[in-house]
Amino acid sequence: MKKQIDYNKKYPLLPLRDVVVFPHMVIPLFVGREKSVNALDEAMKTERLIVLATQTDAQITVPERKDLYDVGTVAEILQLLKLPDGTIKVLVEGVSRGYISDFGSDKDYYEVKIKDIDRTVETGIDIQSLKQNLLDTFDKYIKLNKKVPREALTSSAGIEDISQLADIISSHVEMKIEYKQSLLDIGSPVDRLSRLIELINGEIEVMYIEKKIQGQVRKHMEKTQKEYYLNEQMKVIKKELGQGEAEVDEIDELRKSIDTARMSTEARTKSLQEVKRLEKMPPMSAESAVVRNYIEWLRDVPWYKKTRDNKDIELSMNILNEDHYGLEEVKERIVEYIAVRQLSKKLKGPILCFVGPPGVGKTSLGRSVARALGRKFVRMSLGGVRDEAEIRGHRRTYVGALPGRIIQMMKKAATVNPVILLDEVDKMSMDFRGDPSSALLEVLDPEQNNSFVDHYMEVPYNLSDVMFITTANVQHKIPLPLLDRMEIIEISSYTEPEKLNIAVKFLLNKQILENGLRRENIEFPDDMILYTIRHYTREAGVRNLERVIAKVCRKVAREVVRNGNDFKKTVTEEALHRFLGPIKFKYGVKEQKNEIGLANGLAWTEVGGDILNIEASLIKGKGNLTLTGKLGEVMQESAHAAHTYVRANQQFFNIEDDILRKSDIHLHVPEGAIPKDGPSAGITMAVVIASLLSNIPVRCDVALTGEITLRGKVLPIGGLKEKILAAHRADIRHVIIPEENEKDLEKIPEYVRQQMVFHPVSKMEEVIFLALQDPDKFFKDHEKTRFLYERWKGHMGDWSIEIGDQVNDKDAIKM
């Protein structure tokens, strides 16, 4: 018999966690909280009625009114059993739903009043259709959810009251607490049925999806179990054949290593395909070794591992300065790269090309750059490489095929962002096997090297994080397409002060350490190091200088062994002659007096600049020009152009016709065994010929460089820095240069510019005025050149200038 509820009376309250009790629902509950136990005791003393309300948060131990839902269920206690652990098992049956009001917690249990909820059934609604729809939907649910017994549908079908039917079915359906509470909140039976049908359909959809997923998982598990079963059979078969389990274990190890290598998608797919092929091959076959080697290459090449770049600009600059003296342009470029890396995460690795003569530190600079950036460093020499496969690798069809040197370097570096130095890029050649420089086009192109494909690897490999540095001695030998992809940084030859600093700060200490000496055993004064540089080395860099210093240290080490560890040797000029022998080199020096037909030219060589004492003699003949000194084709053409210019302007030089018709000129450029070429001696040869034919001496304190045209224009030349340094070393303080080379004077060291005077010229008339001793002898009598004579007379002043004296030449550039 249904209990009657007094809505004016307060009833004990039992807060519930993770469960909603509906009217007509019988459910056992386990109660352990003190106030809840007291509430049960109070209910048992009276009518056995208690209010069940679900908590909004099950984690709350002592709930307040705000922690309970607004609608609860009045339930009758059917049975109560106290358990040994102090908790109570109680069986309750829901009686009616109602609003909770007048919540009280002052006593040792919660108590509330209940307000009735309107349960009126609306008219005009087909109740039977709605009821049947609910039962059909519940039937579908039971078929999918095996936890709900079939009897629940049978018992529900016999319930006529749709409110009771909705509550009974709600108690059987598994759904979220929030959804169940929303059904309890609805008073209208029709609305409750409609909401329940909607929620059950939602649960059915979820179960359909779960069933589909479970089917897929089951199918995959069956396939996995099948493969496991077959693999176990294969193991047994191979064991019976005497092949053992080592090969099977190796296949498993390869698969595991592929999983942990974090390859690209293409590489992983290719690797797994090759592993399947390897499984089917006899382990002792030659093909299996090839496939296994290929898989190991794919696995061992780095795909993701990076070193963290050093972003401290000051630290990087200190590292570069520790390793190399000077080379400011290179250091600034590296610092700029580090700065940009801090601002942009998408910066591609730069491709730099260091161009300079041997021994200036190009290769060691690459290693220093890697140290400054905190990256791994690998070096690859391209000297003599003439096979494209050296870069791209051989295809796997060849016996003994391997990846190209680029992939090998990446494996050696073990990171995806190393510094790779491609040394001697100008020394590559080509033959019938291909052109390696063309293969490098893809490697050194930032727009393409993110998908570099090696012939052996056959999958794209990303090289965009690599910093490539190439080195070359001469720029013109690098193929133009390759040159276009690189950022050229020219490293010129060292000046004497730079060599001296490098020797004092780096080379001497290094050789003292390598030869087992202490700093106290040897005193190598700066002037003696400079003497060594000038007379025992002739190079653009410091490689031979290091060898010479090493030889001196070995000689001193011998004397230390002979005389004891406290022995100290001071290196003098006499000691150098004894250790190294007589002086080996004598740099070009200027002439001591002005002479006819002799001028100081300037030349660029791979070991720096030098003085060319170009000389000429007049002999009886027919007006021919003879050239000696192993001159190249371009230099011979330049000599003929200079000769033609002087003959075409003979009236300005007061040259008699008989001299031109009855005399030959022999022009010689010492030293005769050394090949010489280039157009930059053109104005020098013109001055020599003009001096010879006009019988006017050339100033010995002037050096000249520049190309000449038939019309007497002076064109620009290259290698100005080396030429200026050669003139400075020869104690020449006035240099005539082409006007268009004036911009290159900024590259000249400051101390040199302060001690020299540079005369930019654009015409040969200016060169003649500056270079000859008395140009007024043949210029002042001609109307066309009188203005030049007046300019020279008024502005050139006295050329007898000592180092450090002030120069008053307004047309000269005092740097």
Image (cartoon, helix red, strand yellow):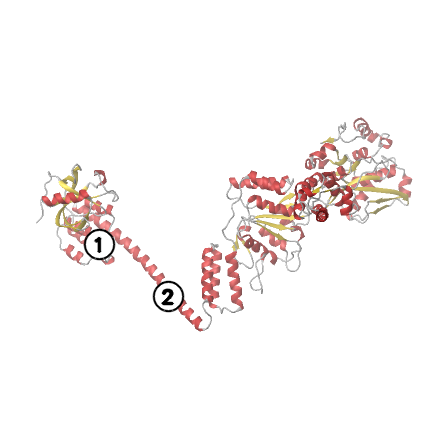
Mark 2, residue position: 226
Q: Secondary structure at mark 2?
A: helix
Which quadrant of the figure contains the C terminus? top right
Would residue 97 be seen by someone viewing this image from the given angle?
A: no
Query: As displayed, is residue 333 above or below residue 93?
Result: above
Q: Secondary structure at mark 1?
A: helix
Find residue 473 and report its horizontal and vertical position in percent.
Answer: 68, 48
Foreground residue among 132 and 32? 32
Which residue, as the protein is rendered here, is positioned at the far top? 794
Mark 1, residue position: 137
Local packing at callout 1 (Cα closer than 10 Å; few below 14, some 14-19, many 20+) is some
Amino acid carrying label 2: it is: Lys
Query: As displayed, is residue 793 above or below residue 507?
Result: above
Tell me whether circle 2 and circle 1 mark residues in contact (CB < 8 Å): no
**What's the residue at 82%, 42% (across, down)?**
614
Find residue 217 and report its horizontal and vertical position in percent.
Answer: 34, 59
Foreground residue among 415 and 131? 415
Left or right relative to 444: residue 264: left
Amino acid carrying label 1: it is: Thr
Find residue 542 and report its horizontal and vertical position in percent.
Answer: 69, 45
Foreground residue among 89 and 618? 89
- Quick one: label 2 or label 1, which is nearer the N terminus? 1
Left or right relative to 20: residue 689: right
Q: How many marks?
A: 2
Q: CA distance from mark 2 to mark 1?
A: 39 Å
Find residue 138 and report its horizontal and vertical position in percent.
Answer: 21, 54
**What's the residue at 53%, 43% (across, down)?**
310
**What's the residue at 16%, 57% (across, down)?**
154
Would residue 135 be seen by someone viewing this image from the given angle?
A: yes
Which label belongs to residue 753?
none
Foreground mark, 2 or 1, reads: 2
Which residue, as the protein is rendered here, is positioned at the far left? 1
